[in-house]
Image (tube, grey):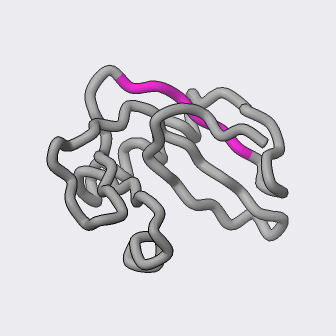
Amino acid sequence: MQRLLKKGQAAHVFNDENTMNQVAQCIIEKGEFIGIVRDYERYGMFFTEPIGYRISPDGSNIPTIPLYYGEIKINADNQYHVIPRTRPSEE
């Protein structure tokens, strides 16, 4: 997260570790294949409750922008990373 903020980019973070784990499990079980975007296989789904929030590059998160979309990206070695987002990834 700090790396993104130092580069002047917003960071998206989960509400907490439990939420992150639940989102990952839901996407693994019921997520939709988005496609291959930037060399990662991607799956995702929308949630009815916010799963995370966006922190602005200036370090503030007020007003908090809630995030309702979760995505898993998988690399060529089958390692995955779960991310809260505003919408599915695009090229």
Relative to the observer, which residue lies in front, 54 or 20? Answer: 54
At x 79% / y 46%, what residue is drawn? 37
Answer left or right for 61 relative to 78. left
| Magenta span contains residue 44 | yes
Left or right: where does residue 4 sit relative to residue 38?
left
Quarter the C terminus occupies: top right
Q: Outermost residue toward the left?
A: 62
Identify the residue at image location x=68%, y=66%. 79
11 up-or-down from 63: above or below: below
Image check: 18 left or right of 36?
left
Question: Residue at left 50%, top 75%?
Answer: 7
Which percent across, then down, holds residue 36?
Answer: 83, 44
Q: Magenta includes 26?
A: no
Question: 90 or 20, which is in the foreground?
Answer: 90
Provide the residue span drawn in magenta: 42-47
Q: Main secondary structure of the magenta part?
A: strand
Q: Residue at x 25, y 66 (%)?
A: 59
Residue 1 position, x and y percent, is: 40, 71
Quadrant position of residue 56: bottom left
- How many badges with numbers are in the image? 0
Please provide percent x and percent y for residue 33. Answer: 73, 31
Up-down relation of residue 15 to residue 31 (above or below):
below
Extreme residue toward the top, this view: 48
